[in-house]
Image (cartoon, rainbow, N blue to C red):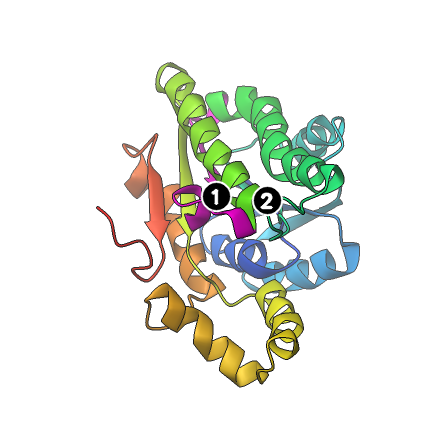
Amino acid sequence: MSKSVAIVTGASQGIGRATAVRLARDFSALALVARNRANLEDTAKAVRAAGAEVLVIDADLAEPRAAQSVVDQTLAAFGRIDALLNIAGAVPQVDLFETTEAQWDAGLALKLHGARRLTIAAWPSLMAAKGAVVLMSGNSASFPKAPYAAVGTINAAIVALAKAFSDKGISDGVQVNSVLPGPVMTGRRRSYLEHWAPLHKMTIEEATAKFPKDAGIARYGEPEEIAELMAFLVSPGARWMTGSALRMDGGEVKSI
């Protein structure tokens, strides 16, 4: 394994954690970023066990100064940045007319602006390495509905942002893509189902079975499956892929 460094945000849980563990097979060092230090340390153990060096950075990327600090710490520790995977950011699923200003601001600050600022801060290093960036969006970018308007709106903005970065990346030698997962069984989704089920007089098992059926898919995705796609997008085999929005959703979106 040659010297190569990736930054993974949202690495404390879910898809971010799975992606970090998967990338440990391909990169010699990883900078793991999230707000929960304890969970990050747990991810770091798994990454080290897979053979990569680790830098743990507990940071809130919703804060404007955090992005440059993450880049500075990564360069101080490892000297380069070859890949950036922007996965941090959960937006509440709240009805359009009930979403508060604070909820809109929080979703935009972390998922959209956090990814934007970190990509810009890392860009000179990514140019030097001819590196790659992935921004995590979601299927709701394609069909925003009133019950989850903020999620769909912000995810659509992520796709547009990635496309804009990819346009600049053509001349700068940086590839940029976005990933749109469908329903994935993460800890956050389990917590949501535990809250949702009793409100609708269902057992957890009934609620868990209902959502894939309603979405027209056979099952939930697993974080490790999304991680494989993320790993491919920052691999040598994907060097000519840029500006793409890749959907991995078990067939949830029926349009072409």
Residue 96 got which mark? 2
Depth-wise, is mark 1 or mark 2 nearer the camera?
A: 2
Q: Residue furthest front?
A: 97
Sooner in the amino-acid sequence: mark 1 or mark 2: 2
Placement of 107 over or under 212, stated as above or below:
above
Which residue is depicted at the point 75% across and 48% down? 35
Q: Please name the residue that numbered disc 1 is placed on.
A: 137
Residue 58 x, y percent position in the rendering: 76, 46
Q: Amino acid at mark 1?
A: Ser
Q: Quadrant of residue 78?
A: top right
Residue 200 x, y percent position in the rendering: 59, 76
Which residue is depicted at the point 78% across and 54% down? 37
Apparent side of residue 7 relative to residue 240 in the rendered image (left or right): right
Apparent side of residue 93 relative to residue 76 in the rendered image (left or right): left
Q: Residues within 10 Å of mark 2 (few under 14, many from 20)?
A: some
Instruction: State how many labels appear.
Output: 2
Q: CA distance from mark 1 to mark 2?
A: 19 Å
Q: Nearer the viewer, residue 250 or 49?
A: 250
Under circle 1, the secondary element is loop
Q: Residues in magenta?
A: 128-147
Q: Is residue 229 magenta?
A: no
Q: Amino acid at mark 2?
A: Leu
Which residue is depicted at the point 68% across and 34% down? 109
The answer, for residue 15, to whether it is visible in the render is yes
Q: Quadrant of residue 67?
A: top right
The answer, for residue 3, to whether it is visible in the render is no
Q: Nearer the viewer, residue 186 or 91?
A: 91
Q: Nearer the viewer, residue 6 or 175?
A: 175
